[in-house]
Image (cartoon, grey):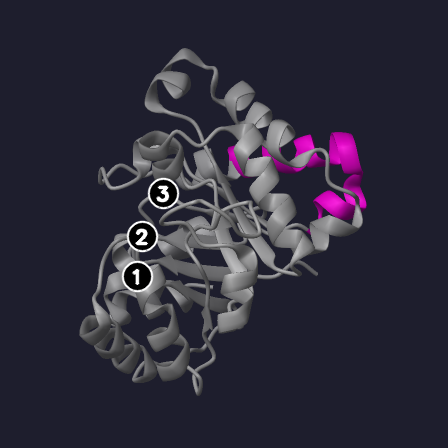
Amino acid sequence: MRKQIVAGNWKMNNDLAETRALISDLAKQSKISNAEVMIAPTFVCLGTALKHSSNLDVEVVAQNMHYATNGAFTGEVSASMLRSLGVQTVILGHSERRAYFNEKDNDLAKKVDAALSNNMRVIFCFGEELADRKSGNHEKVVESQIKNALFHLSDDAWESVVLAYEPVWAIGTGETATPEQAQEMHAFIRSVLASKYGNDISSEVSILYGGSVKPNNAKEIFSKPDVDGGLIGGASLNAEDFYAIVNAF
């Protein structure tokens, strides 16, 4: 049975005091769903988040990491460094990392390998631009991103991989793919996995939707059979809104 997951990506928001305050607000919320809950603070707030969430049913995860173990990579953070803090899951391939920092599929393949070799779980992001959607090329783009970065993995590795489909045109724009569009793409993604790894593995991989999920649309999106949760951006910065999404299952 694949897992239901709601992960809040805080991006470059919240200093130490704001991180403590938001976690305090999260502690006041009630969870009635069985979904796994994750939050991804900035690197400088990971330690604080881990300390202040230790009594909560919330996993603190990282927003990114480098593929190297160590070395002359100023400003970067390795998988072993994250593990030394107690972080066990990392988000890789987010559309903003691809767009603003020019991350390519081959770089992401190395990051995935580094995370898995350090016994970390990966939330792997991918998705099409608006031009790809309008041209009808969206499925080819998504298939290429998955194959190029992940199809070298062994069958066993997929136990530690969560997929997150992000229609880039629906991130921070107020636009949202319809629940039907989300389901259509998630079903396609599962078929791409099945073509390489078979139905047994593809049916067990959690696929999250990451495109402007809000309290008022989460229930309908999450009701679709191939949507296993969400990677939440702006709405995760408000504890009440975030838990409304968590409880949408």
Quadrant in which the N terminus is drawn: bottom right
Label 2 or label 3, whichever comes before in sequence order = 3
The amino acid type found where label 3 is placed reads Gly
Kind of element beneath mark 2: loop
Q: Amino acid at mark 2?
A: Gly
* Magenta: main secondary structure: helix
For image coordinates 38% across by 68% down, the residue present is: 46
Q: Residue furthest front?
A: 72
Rendering coords of residue 100 (x, y %): 31, 33
On the picture, is 75 further left or further right than 107?
Answer: left
Marks 2 and 3, how far apart at CA = 8 Å
Whether residues under marks 2 and 3 lie with C-beta atoms below 8 angstroms apart, the answer is no
Which residue in the protein does label 3 denote?
211
Task: Give the percent coordinates (x, y) of residue 191.
Answer: 68, 33
Please give the residue where the numbered disc 2 appears in the rendered image: 233
Horizontal side of 22 relative to 54 (left or right) equals left
Regarding mark 3 in the picture, which secondary structure is present there? loop
Q: Are marks 1 and 2 in contact (CB under 8 Å)?
A: yes
Q: Nearer the viewer, residue 179 or 236?
A: 236
The residue stretch that appears in magenta:
184-204
- 192 inside magenta stretch: yes
Q: Between residues 175 and 234, which one lies in front from this camera angle?
A: 234
Marks 3 and 1 close (CB-CB < 8 Å): no
Quickly name the residue at label 1. Answer: 236
Type of amino acid under label 1: Ser
Q: Residue at x 46, y 38 (%)?
A: 182
> Tag 1, which secondary structure?
helix
Tell me which corner region of the image, top left, top right, bottom left or bottom right, holds residue 98.
top left
For the residue pair 67 and 125, the one nearer the viewer reads as: 67
Mark 1–mark 2 Cα distance, whole angstroms, equals 6 Å
Q: Is residue 215 visible?
A: no
- Give the crowd class for mark 2: few <14, some 14-19, many >=20 residues within 10 Å: many
